[in-house]
Each structure stands twice: as C-alpha cells, then as structure tokens.
Image: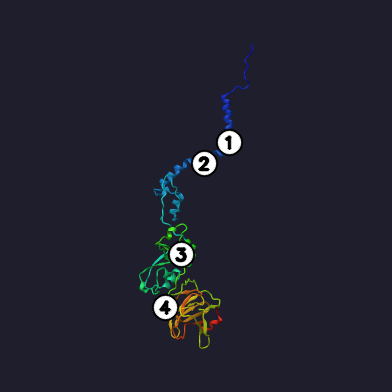
Amino acid sequence: MHSTRRPHATPSARRTLERSLRHWGEVLHRYRLRVIADLAVAALVLCLPFGVTAAQSGATGNSIASAPVADVLASYAGVEEPVRAQTVARGETITAAGDPRTAIAADVKPIEHYKLGPGDTLQSLADHYKVSPEAIAFSNGITDPNLKAQIGREIMIPPGEGALYFVKEGDTVQSVATSFNVDPKAIMDHSRLYFEPENFAPGKTIFIPGATVPGLVYAKARPYENVRAPAVLSRPVEAVISTSGQFLWPVGGRITQQFWAFHTGVDLAAAYGSGVGASDAGVVVATGWVPVGGMSILIKHADGFETGYYHLGAIFVAEGQRVARGQIVGSIGMTGVTTGPHVHWELKQNGAFVNPLRYTVR
C-alpha cells in the first residue's frame, strides 16, 4: 500500500502576506522621501479651493484679524501696507477697478485748454508751454497777436511744435499731411491711427507734429496793406545757440552801400516784401519804429553779438521771442529815410559797430 506523499512547500496564506508586507516595506523605505513629497503635493492641491474661499470671505470683512501677521505689524509700525493681488474664484465676474476709457501713452502729451488773462501774450504762453507763438496762434485761428481783445477766451495749447487740426468731411491722412508739409506717418503714429482709426473721423481734433504753419504779422508799415507772413515755423530754442562767428546775409540782394565810418551797417537792396531772415539764432530784444531807420528789429546772439535790421515793411516776431538761424523775421520795406526798398543791416560786438561782411557767409 502506497503512502500519500505531501509536497515539500505547502502554500500558506500567512507566509504569502508576510512576504508581500516585507517586500512593500522595503519599497516604501527605499522611496519614502518621494512618496512623502507626492502625498504632500496632493494634499495641498486638494486644499486650495477651501483656502481661496476662506481668503475671500476674510477680505470682505476688512478686519485686522483677516490680514497676514506681517501686514498687521507693518500697520502698527506706521509702514504703508503692501499691495496684494487677490485671486478671483472661477465662475465670478472680473470687474474693472479703474476708468475704462483709453489711457494716453506716457510719451503723448494731451491737448491743454487755457483761459486767456489780462497779462497773457503769445510769447509768454509760448515760453511757458515750450511751443512757438505761431503754433498757438494757428491752432486757435488767432491772426491778431494782440490778445487784449480776447481776454477770457479759452484756447487750446498744442502738445508740441506743430498744429492742431479739425478734421473735416472728405479729409484723408495724405491730404492733411500734404497741406502741412509733413510725412503721413507722423500723423498716423501720434494719433494711433493704426489701432484707433476713429481718431481721424470728421469733427475730431488731431495734432500734426512738425507741421508748417504761417507766421504772424506783428507790425506793418502800411496798415491798409494785406501783408501775409511767409509760411515759416518758429521752433523754440532752449537757449541762445553759441555762434561760430559766421552770420548769414539776411536777404539775397545786392549791396548798395558799404560799412564805413559814417555808415554803421551794410545796405542790401531787394524787392519790396522780400523776407528778411535772422543772421543767427538768438533772442529778439527790440522791435518797432526808430528815427531814420523806420521799422526795425534787434536780435541778441551769443558771444556779445547783436544784429539790427532797419527800413522794414513788416515785422513777424515779437520782443522776447527766440528765433532760429535763417528764420524770416521781417520783410523788405521803405520805412524811415530811404530812397528805395532795402534793409540796413548792422552788426555789433560787445556794443561796438563792426563790419558785418567780415563775419558773414552767403
């Protein structure tokens, strides 16, 4: 009779469980740091919604208890509370906290409005706002430089050297740019027309940087004449530009009388009404009528130089105005003692008359 043979290894649930526990224990021991970090991240993610809800409910109370400890300590110490961003929960509406209108870029100055007072002049306004008198006058339709009759009027101040323009029906950027002798891109860039084309709609006021505008007639020899200044732009100068000792002829005419002991300047004949330009950059120190010389302009330059222009028919600058080299300041006339249209052109150095032709270029 054969005996029943038992296997050498009888399966045992207890031993299998022990082996499994021992195996996973070794795995957990080996990767314990990674497992702990993963569990911590999972717990943090699961807790985020509850933390956001608690922060929002605490913020509406505006109590010191709801603020972080650092902020509370800062408030007691007199330190301004730091600005904190608040998270908006999903499903809520984000509302604008500020003005919804389009903000003006930091490098674009706005058009200012100014009410004229009794002491205002075009030159004083030009000096204050750092633009030319012509730019202010053109932008407001001012043809009479005397502002006394316009006290109380509100005018617009252009944000820079150029012109303010009221857009009319049928205008295009190209047509406006052509009339003011500027590049159309200058208008497009300043008025942001690439992104906001509605800024060029009829009825809108736009600024044209660098626009050429007509000059002003401050005085004319014959009041009944319709004297028009040349289309010249007076760009303001921060200071009197240092001269190189070379001055421009004020007009392209012919010499009718030289400088000598009994003639303090040079006479240059030209057609009546021709423009007379400043020989160099400087400041107008005097304008008006003088005996013999008639209507005149005196301009002070750097290094002790001063130029004078006499027998003018019209004056296009005001006393105290800064002028650029070559800028038209007057026109050829026949005022004072003269036998024909010309300009008597003088040059002084430190108060003494000198021959202009020794310091000039044509």
> Can residue 107 be seen in this snapshot?
no
Alpha carbon separation for disc pair 4 and 2: 85 Å
Q: Are the residues at dot 1 and dot 3 in contact (C-beta closer than 8 Å)?
A: no
Alpha carbon separation for disc pair 1 and 3: 82 Å
The amino acid marked with disc number 3 is: Ser
- Residue beneath disc 3: 175
* Residue projecting furthest to the right: 2
Q: Earlier in the sequence, mark 2 or mark 1?
A: 1
Q: Residues within 10 Å of mark 2 (few under 14, many from 20)?
A: few
- Residue beneath disc 1: 29
**Of the pair 7 and 81, the residue shown nearer to us:** 7
Alpha carbon separation for disc pair 4 and 3: 33 Å
Q: Residue at x 58, y 34 (%)?
A: 27
Q: Position of residue 319 (x, y in %)?
A: 44, 77
Left or right side of 64 for 301: right
- Residue beneath disc 4: 219
Q: Position of residue 303 (x, y in %)?
A: 53, 78
The amino acid marked with disc number 2 is: Val
Q: Secondary structure at mark 4?
A: strand
Q: Residue at x 59, y 28 (%)?
A: 19
Alpha carbon separation for disc pair 2 and 1: 19 Å
Q: Secondary structure at mark 3?
A: helix
**Between tags 1 and 3, which lies in front?**
3
Q: Earlier in the sequence, mark 4 or mark 2?
A: 2
Q: Earlier in the sequence, mark 1 or mark 4?
A: 1
> How many numbered dots are placed on residues in this image?
4
* Rendering colour mode: rainbow
- Residue beneath disc 2: 41
